[in-house]
Amino acid sequence: MLKSPPSNQSKLEMVTLEQLVPKDHLVRKIDQAIDFEFIRDEVAHLYCHNNGRPAIDPVRLFKMMLLGYIFGIKSERQLVKEVEVNMAYRWFLRMTITEKVIDASTLSQNRLRRFNGTDVFERIFT
């Protein structure tokens, strides 16, 4: 007898990102191999320390750009869409399942305004 499967979209489950990301996923290997905290020191001189709006975490910005490079995501808009739905990317970026992803213009404006004309990318990615 042919039956329709139940609708599970509204089903409540207790789950963590840790459970959703396979143990052998590439982002886990990268996270294990590299301590990205050094990025804060590398870019500290590019941020104002005593005024302005709170900054987007520079470690998260660079890790997002790294994801785009590694997985061949050429567009910042597409990268944001991928982070919205890919739990492994969220895990790598230390985001929660429901946390709002920064918009593409924030990513590109930081790249173009804050980091343009510096050697930050060379220092971080070499």
Image (spheres, grey):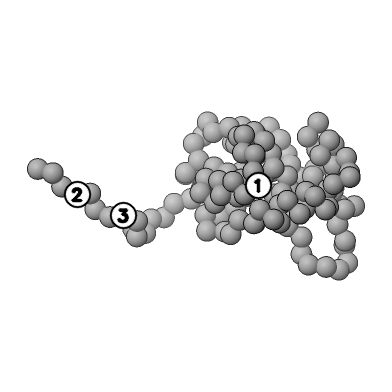
Disc on the earlier residue, 1 or 3? 3
64 and 33: which is toward the camera: 64
In the image, residue 35 sits, relative to residue 58, either above or below, namely: above
Label 2 sits on a secondary structure element that is: loop
**In front: mark 2 or mark 3?**
2
Question: Percent from the top left, x then y, of residue 8?
Answer: 31, 54
Mark 2 to mark 3: distance in Å? 12 Å
Position of the N terminus, as image quadrant, is: top left
Instruction: Give the residue number, with chain letter if any, for mark 3.
Output: 8
Mark 1 to mark 3: distance in Å? 32 Å
Specify whether 111 is left or right of 48.
left
Indicate the amino acid at tag 3: Asn
Specify whether 15 is left or right of 82.
left
State the residue at coordinates (51%, 34%).
23
State the residue at coordinates (60%, 56%).
101
State the residue at coordinates (81%, 31%).
126
**Residue 90 visible, this angle:** no
Quadrant in which residue 74 is drawn: top right
In the image, residue 20 sits, relative to residue 126, either above or below, namely: below
**In front: mark 1 or mark 3?**
1
Instruction: Give the residue number, with chain letter if any, for mark 1.
Output: 76
Question: Percent from the top left, x then y, of residue 109?
Answer: 76, 54
Mark 1 neighbour density, 10 Å: few (under 14) some (14–19) many (20 or more): some
State the residue at coordinates (90%, 52%).
45
Disc on the earlier residue, 1 or 2? 2
Indicate the amino acid at tag 2: Ser
Disc on res. 4: 2
In the image, residue 38 sits, relative to residue 113, either above or below, namely: above
Label 1 sits on a secondary structure element that is: helix
Mark 2 neighbour density, 10 Å: few (under 14) some (14–19) many (20 or more): few
Disc on res. 27: none
Indicate the amino acid at tag 1: Glu
